[in-house]
Image (cartoon, rainbow, N blue to C red):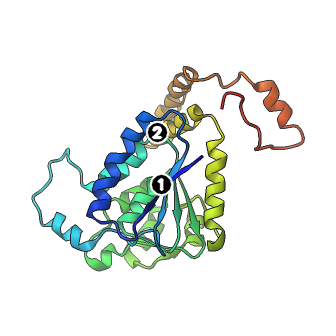
Amino acid sequence: MPAWRASSSTVRTNAIAGTAPCVTPFSKRSTSFGPTGSSGAGGVYSSGLDLNFLREVSNGPLLDWDRPSPTIQIAEALRAFPRIVIAQVHGYCLGGALGIMNCHDLVYAAEDAQLGMPEILRGSFGQLVTTTLLHSGLPVKKLAHIALVGRNISGREADTLGIVSQAVPADELEQHTLGIAREIASRHLAPLEHHKITVQMGRDLSLSQAIQLDQLVGQRMRSAMDPLDDVESYLKSQKGGPNLSYKRPDV
């Protein structure tokens, strides 16, 4: 079954301090833990960093190059977390929260959700958000429009742009997201983990290097399970069309 972690409507000091450390150690204690995710604890997903906290951090001493800010630590922890991480987005998702959302593996948003970058208006340029949107493959002109104009886009528009995995009616969002999470949880953990390794490492490589990575990751996965040991049952289950209810016997 998927495990879910709710986020506060504003990312504050205690939330930042508490989220990053709890991610990696948990994965080391569990071998059967399925997908996890984040959702807003109130009427919004997150309105971004607490600006008073951000001012304290910004006015403090410079961090060493190898000591990233707490927001960056969360982003990197999500990318490195060896489980599928799903964001369920409703209401507002602004600023740094949008950057953190971009580091989830899957994002399901309400059609009327509001995603945006208010940083330019305030006097910044959108650290983390700009980079994660650019690396997601969002066209540069679309990225510039979202950042420079500062108008929010809806969940439906974000779906069209490829920023989220899928947008659904707000009253169906939680049921839809949990349904997807349950489907993923019914599958063998090894292919899920190795999919994430390939995506998170391959996105930073050239095409030729990413193809080579595929081969290496495939060999690594075979040390955990045989992807072809139930072919006959699988083919039988798919007669007449795709059947997503098939389940490997070793799950």
Residue at 31% from the left image edge and 75% from the top image edge: 120
Q: Secondary structure at mark 1?
A: loop
Inspect this view and state whether residue 169 appears. no
Q: Nearer the viewer, residue 10 or 217?
A: 10
The reply to whether the C-beta atoms of the residues labelled 1 and 2 are less than 8 Å apart is no
Q: Nearer the viewer, residue 175 or 58?
A: 175
**Which residue lies under the disc numbered 2?**
82
Residue 23's image quarter? top left
Estimate the x, y position of residue 136 in percent, counting from the top left: 47, 54
**Which residue lies under the disc numbered 1?**
136
Which amino acid type is marked by label 1? Ser
Q: Is residue 2 left or right of residue 70?
A: right
Which amino acid type is marked by label 2? Pro
Residue 140's image quarter? bottom left
Name the quarter where the C terminus is drawn.
top right
Q: Is residue 187 left or right of residue 218?
A: right
Q: Is residue 8 left or right of residue 162?
A: left
Badge 1 crowding class, 10 Å Cα cut-off, few under 14, some 14 to 19, many 20 or more, is some
